[in-house]
Amino acid sequence: MELEKIHYDNKIVKAFIIATIIFGIVGMTVGLLAAIQLFYPLANFDLQYTTFGRIRPLHTNAVIFAFVGNAMFAGIYYSLQRLLKTRMFNDSLSWIHFWGWQLIILAAAITLPLGLTTSKEYAELEWPIDIAIALIWVVFGINMIGTIIKRREQHMYVAIWFYIATFVTVAVLHIVNSFEMPVTFFKSYSWYAGVQDALVQWWYGHNAVAFFLTTPFLGIMYYFLPKAANRPVYSYRLSIIHFWSLIFIYIWAGPHHLLYTALPEWAQSLGVVFSIMLIAPSWGGMLNGLFTLRGAWDRVREDAVLKFMVVAVTAYGMATLEGPLLSLKNVNAITHYTDWIVAHVHVGGLGWNGFLIFGMIYWLIPRMWNTKLYSSKLANLHFWIGTLGIVFYALPMYIGGVVQSLMWKEFAADGFLKYQNFLETTTQILPMYMLRAVGGTLYLTGVLIMTYNLIKTAASGKFVANEEAEVAPLPKAIHDGGHWHSVLERKPILFTSLALVAILIGGIIEMVPTFLIKSNIPTIASVKPYTPLELHGRDIYIREGV
Amino acid sequence: MYKNILQNIDHIAIWPVISFVIFFVFFIGLLVWVFTADKNFMNEMSQKPLHDGSELNSDTESLMQ
């Protein structure tokens, strides 16, 4: 068979990696500042723009959408081309996607400190930016689906299914959650209110974690871990079960954020049951990742890339066991609203996302610059300092969370709460907040070491903007038949539609009754629509993020 | 108006049954397929990331020193 010469686009991957590192440093620095403010209020700088209520959403948006988001796109643009043996569908779309996404980040970095926010968790950006996000996301989708259609591989590898699920689900989540009525260019009111608002918010919020922070990175794991270990995936069967059960079950779990609230009992219970079931696919995926290293564990001792990936996958396993346990009502009664939850998300964010990204970048840069890593010693130092950073972050927050929870529920002999002032718990756990900032500093230091190491690496090599590859063209006549999943893997549009159906079922079953059946909507006779004065007060609270 | 209709559906109790059936059929079907699937195809697919036609990527050893 005659081989075709093609060129993979590395330039777009490079751009996304640079953005990842820059916004990683920015986002983590803002996080560190917010952490310091909790024990050293002068770090507010006496400016409204840098108060805790405004920079906390800046931190979450920066690390989720700028740091992790750019890394996701870097990983997808690199692996998609190689798994499908074709260049991206359209270079212009790639660059519109890149610059569009960076402009959205810039808009967030300006509006959030100004207090322009919807106050919806992980969806704080105001409506003009929401529209921009939807448009750029569609550009990304067209580029990805277009690439899949012009592929030279008959079957889509499991990583690509995860990318497809990411694209369709984030689109659905973003659009449904963002229904809002604009009143001015920078102010809108959500379409939802009361219990419906809460249900939509946590259907969105939980699945933003699932489909922005998890599924794309599972795809990245399924590509980069076998690459780095030079071993095939442990079990392709397991990966099929992993994929379909994960996307099907995840979408139901949102209501576990609303235990002991006005949400109908049946919806709370559904959320809990599906959260517990999630342990199975999550751990299936984790084990599939770890078992891929069978026969390569000797290299894990030497190779920083594999070290980062092993800790990332392990952190994924820990966070996905912890999450379902936290969703049990009795555990939730202890941990909800405390700093335990902050520790939980940071095990996921610092461990799973952060370490997988570092592993991926350490693997990518020497290859894209056709050179060797400048210093393995520094990479290993980064690994250890980062791991220590996670431990110093999480442990104090766990302890602080339990202390908070116990103090909030402590009754005095006269039957009143013993600690009636919220500030009493805060002052009690100040040492924990200080230790947490130490953890954050360690982690950020590691990232700075990595940045230095990667700049030196790039300087020692020559960037390969268009990487040449020799690939076999796809045979014209694709044979029909085979098992139904292998047929599916040849039909991207059908596959995408089925993935969409799988993720819609849970949302529809939970939302339709809550929206349409009166008994599901708790109302209190004395609650009336806000007066103009009340609404103004509410707007101030929203602006200040309290 | 459609709200009133939905509020009064007699068979709203069937929702949980429907969700259970969808769920059950989905996973049984998935498991049956996965365990009856062709072994060679599975092996071939699990090797996918390792062959992408580019020399820069096909080195067996890591580029870490």
Image (cartoon, rainbow, N blue to C red):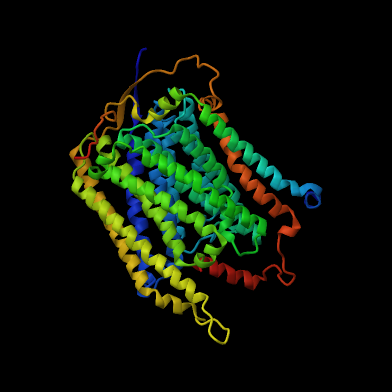
From the top left corner, tell me how far across and down residue B26 is, in percent.
61, 37
Question: Which image quarter: residue B42?
Answer: top left
Q: Is residue A157 above or below residue A373?
A: above
From the top left corner, tell me how far across and down residue A176 is, in percent.
60, 49
Res A113 visible: no
Assign the N terminus of chain A to one quadrant of the image.
Answer: top left
Q: Nearer the viewer, residue A335 or A460?
A: A335
Q: Is residue A66 above or below residue A115?
A: above
Question: Which image quarter: residue A232?
Answer: top left
Q: Is residue A498 above or below residue B40?
A: below
Residue pushed farthest bottom?
Answer: A414
Q: Nearer the viewer, residue A27 or A321?
A: A321
Res A465 visible: yes
From the top left corner, tell me how far across and down residue A438 is, in percent.
30, 65
| Residue at position x 41%, y 39% in the image | A288
| Residue at position x 37%, y 54% in the image | A350
| Residue at position x 65%, y 39% in the image | B22
Tally of marks: 0
